[in-house]
Image (tube, rainbow, N blue to C red):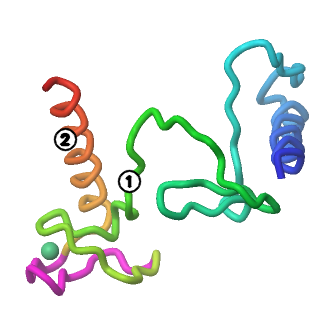
Amino acid sequence: MPLQQCLRHQQSAFKHFFAKRARHPRFKSKKQRQSATFASSAFAYRNGQITLAKCQAPLNIRWSRVLPSAPSSKRCHGCGFVVESLPLDVRTWDCPDCGTQGIDRDINAARNILKAGTALLAGAES
Ligand SMILES: [Zn+2]
């Protein structure tokens, strides 16, 4: 999976290079701090642990921040209720828990992200 992701990165790098949007791809130095990107099909996220495809044991990860538990567009900004499914073509929805009507998907997500960020900052200050 890391090799496949490497090829995906290289593919997009050369695509941008040949479209004259970017410089020639450079060899990525492995001397500095490293990061990894994985397609959503390449890992499983369960109980706060990430297990890569074809691996038995979960990765030993030191998280720099708490991951959001649910997609922010599916969580009601008023009461925190999470709807089961919300197809992308559904732009507004009604909360079945607190009764808020006409919740705009994008504005709701923005409010949830703001709330999470504010909570994170408040935690960092105290
Ligand atoms: Zn609600």
- Residue 107 lies left or right of residue 67; in this view the side is left
Looking at this view, is 112 or 61 the one in front?
Answer: 61
Which residue is rendered at x = 29% and y = 49% of the image? 113
Magenta residue check for 68: no
Quadrant containing ligand 1: bottom left
- Residue 103 lies left or right of residue 39; in this view the side is left
**What SS does tag 1 mark?**
loop
The C terminus sits in image quarter: top left
Which residue is rendered at x = 62% and y = 42% of the image? 60
- Tell me which corner region of the image, top left, top right, bottom left or bottom right, holds residue 92: bottom left
Up-down: is 87 above or below 60?
below
Which range of residues does the magenta coloring cover? 89-102
Asked whether the residues under the numbered discs 2 and 1 touch, taking CB atoms below 8 Å apart as contact, a structural biologist would say: no
Up-down: is 118 above or below 54?
above
Q: Residues within 10 Å of mark 2 (few under 14, many from 20)?
A: few
Q: CA distance from mark 2 to mark 1?
A: 12 Å
Tell me which label, 2 or 1, sits earlier in the chain: 1
Q: Position of residue 90 (x, y in %)?
A: 38, 80
Q: Position of residue 32 (x, y in %)?
A: 72, 14
Looking at this view, is 21 or 68 the one in front?
Answer: 68
Which label is found at residue 59?
none
Q: Position of residue 11 (x, y in %)?
A: 88, 43
Up-down: is 19 above or below 112?
above
* Residue topped by disc 1: 68
* Residue topped by disc 2: 119
- Tell me which corner region of the image, top left, top right, bottom left or bottom right, holds residue 43: bottom right
Looking at this view, is 76 or 42 the one in front?
Answer: 42
- Residue 83 lies left or right of residue 100; in this view the side is right
Which residue is rendered at x = 38% and y = 60% of the image? 69
- Principal secondary structure, stretch drawn in magenta: loop
